[in-house]
């Protein structure tokens, strides 16, 4: 006496194989749609390809495990960089500064300049004047006369007019 437990076909025909394939495909689609996955498009087959499949006596259905795809983060390679070259600012070009002598006064009583700069004094007064002190000696400057000096060394240079000692001024060289 034969005992059958359920309806398990011992031999699957090509029609039963197609039904099983459709059933499994639809089940997979249902499961994937529940997981928000989009299935990969199935390759197109022609009827001629379907008929060339050999019939199987037994059907073994193995579950297809989908690999878990983890996002890949790529870190940029660490490269050694050379420090930026130190660029020295060019030294300022020497400048010329003008000081006018008028109304018994120097127009710039406290002038600040850079080393290498030149100061030109012009006597625009009706009386003669001098630039005297701190190594400066213009001699007598008549009306319209000029005196110039280039300051190469940093420091404070005080000067006055030898004819009018109340006329004082200074040059600060940075």
Image: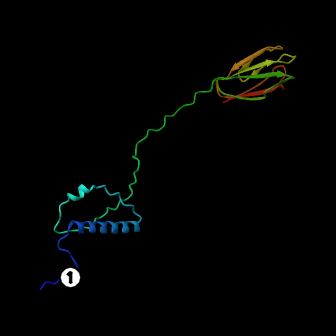
x and y percent of residue 165 in the render? 83, 24
Q: Quadrant of the C terminus?
A: top right
Q: Quadrant of residue 159?
A: top right
The answer to which of 144 and 52 lies nearer the viewer is 52
Report the side of 140 relative to 154 (left or right). right
Q: Is residue 129 above or below residue 166?
A: above
x and y percent of residue 47 in the render? 26, 57
SS state under label 1: loop
How many numbered marks does the figure carry?
Answer: 1
Q: Is residue 55 above or below residue 94?
A: below
Kindly identify which residue carries mark 1: 5
Q: Residues within 10 Å of mark 1 (few under 14, many from 20)?
A: few
x and y percent of residue 94 in the render? 65, 23
Q: Quadrant of residue 96?
A: top right
Q: Is residue 80 above or below residue 92?
A: below
Q: Quadrant of the N terminus?
A: bottom left
User: Residue at the spot x=62%, y=27% of the render?
Assistant: 92
User: Residue at the spot x=75%, y=22% of the render?
Assistant: 98
Report the side of 5 relative to 31 (left or right). left
Report the side of 129 relative to 156 (left or right). right
In the image, farthest residue toward the left: 1
In the image, farthest residue toward the bottom: 1
User: Residue at the spot x=46%, y=38% of the render?
Assistant: 83
User: Residue at the spot x=31%, y=69% of the render?
Assistant: 23
x and y percent of residue 29 in the render? 36, 66
Q: How is the image coloured?
A: rainbow
Q: Is residue 125 above or below residue 61?
A: above
């Amino acid at each position: 006496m034969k005992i059958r437990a359920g309806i398990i076909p011992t031999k699957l025909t090509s029609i039963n194989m197609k039904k099983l394939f459709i059933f499994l495909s639809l089940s997979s689609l249902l499961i994937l749609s529940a997981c928000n996955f989009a299935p990969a498009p199935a390759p197109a087959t022609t009827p001629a390809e379907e008929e060339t499949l050999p019939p199987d006596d037994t059907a073994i259905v193995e579950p297809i495990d989908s690999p878990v795809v983890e996002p890949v983060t790529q870190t940029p390679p660490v490269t050694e960089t050379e420090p930026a070259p130190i660029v020295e600012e060019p030294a300022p070009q020497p400048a010329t500064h003008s000081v006018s002598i008028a109304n018994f006064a120097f127009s710039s009583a406290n002038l600040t300049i850079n080393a290498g700069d030149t100061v030109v004094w012009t006597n625009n007064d009706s009386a003669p004047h001098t630039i005297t002190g701190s190594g400066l000696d213009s001699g007598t400057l008549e009306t319209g006369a000029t005196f110039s000096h280039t300051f190469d060394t940093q420091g404070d240079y005080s000067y006055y007019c030898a004819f009018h000692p109340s006329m004082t001024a200074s040059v600060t060289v940075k």
